[in-house]
Amino acid sequence: MKKEFRDIVIIGAGPSGSIAAGYLEKHNASVMILEKQKFPRFTIGESLIPKCMDNFEEAGFLEILKSQGFQKKFGARFIKENKTAEFDFSKKFGEGWNWTWQVPRADFDKVLTDELSLRGVDIRFETEVTSVSYRDKFWTIMTRNQNGKVSEITSKFIIDSSGNGRVLARQLELEAPPKIYDHSSIFTHIKETNRPEDIEGNQITFEVLNTETWFWYIPFSNGVSSLGFVGPNSWIDNSNEDNNVAFKNMLRETKFYQGRFDNYQFNFRPVKINNISKNVKYIHGEGFALTGNSAEFLDPVFSSGVAFATESGLLAAKLALREINGEKINWEVEYSDYIKKGVNVFSTYVKEWYSGKLQDIFFHPFPNPKIKEQICAVLAGYVWDNKNPFVRNHARILENLHMLIQKEKIA
């Protein structure tokens, strides 16, 4: 049996793991990535937000990503019946990036891993982590590759970026009740041969069917578009029909997009994910940190998944490197508290979206420009900027604003 040693082992080669590895490679760390799947591989999470761009840049990926011609995303549009709310990232509160990308993740993630390989990072694809154990400040990680070969890897630190694989969450029994209950999604891709120009054919749009159910349209630069629904489990599972039939029936319940996709074949049978929200008891421990979806996933309505994945992956890599170099790290303050601060902001927005309060705010006929800029900064992912009152006082300010809107209706 082959035995190896690395200072830091990263589980998962998605954006979170790749960002962590990119940073560590730039700082000459001893690192290895273990990835269960072979790339390219399909995954969801195709709409990024501008906060990601800071992390791509710091980890050394920005230029290679810019060269790929991915669909640029300058904002987001929300539609409900005859009402529209558009957010332009160039008109947000504070500083930061005013654009990002909409990407087919199979291609996007492979760009990251190909770049890491060119930079000399050791990535073990089709390698499953079968067990982990921690003793005397070292991890023993047992793996098995696609040929059944077993290996033992020793490391000082594990960064778990395994996403839905949730390797450490499962092996260390860290799973916890989710913050958002009872929501599922179903999605597929189509090849649009007659895509409209301008905003109709290049910008992400969310169509609200009812307070808790919505549809996404995400066009990519290669002519493929992502279509999906998110709603209560009971709505997603309301039919015993085949997923193809069920998805076509769901499309008929849209109003704005009704009929637009009728003549397209699905690129693959629609995929259903039940209970999409995930959570853990804690996101760090002695010798390990959880990043991205391996720690927590809220809901796709504001496309925050990759932003948290890259932010947590980058931060975990920085702290892990400092720790193995002998520095004492207060993980609770520097990692957990920081990440949870951003998660808590987005949690408020997601919860108030499904309560209907945020929808009332979004679709107000005469939005205050200053308030809209501040909300737009949150949607862009700048959820750690305490200069923004819609970050600093997120729960109270949304509640107060909604109360004002309700008073307007009464008056």
Image (cartoon, rainbow, N blue to C red):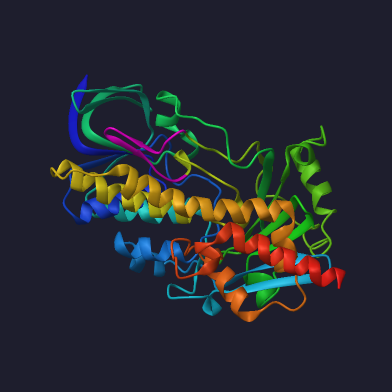
The residue most toward the top is: 1
x 43%, y 37%: residue? 37
In the rendered image, the quadrant that contains the N terminus is top left
In the rendered image, the vertical position of residue 19 relative to residue 381, given as above or below: above
In the rendering, at what x and y percent does residue 308 appear?
Answer: 45, 52
In the rendering, at what x and y percent does residue 23 appear?
Answer: 26, 54
79 and 197: which is toward the camera: 79
x 21%, y 56%: residue? 26
Q: Is residue 38 left or right of residue 396?
A: left
Query: Which corner quadrant of the image does residue 396 belong to?
Result: bottom right
Stretch of the chain drawn in magenta: 281-292
Q: Can the viewer see residue 273?
A: yes
x 49%, y 69%: residue? 388
In the rendered image, the quadrant that contains the C terminus is bottom right
338 and 91: which is toward the camera: 338
In the rendering, at what x and y percent does residue 12 appear?
Answer: 38, 40
x 76%, y 42%: residue? 244
Q: Can the viewer see residue 67?
A: no
Q: Is residue 338 left or right of residue 135?
A: right
220 and 307: which is toward the camera: 307
In the rendering, at what x and y percent does residue 331 appear?
Answer: 30, 43
Q: Is residue 311 magenta?
A: no
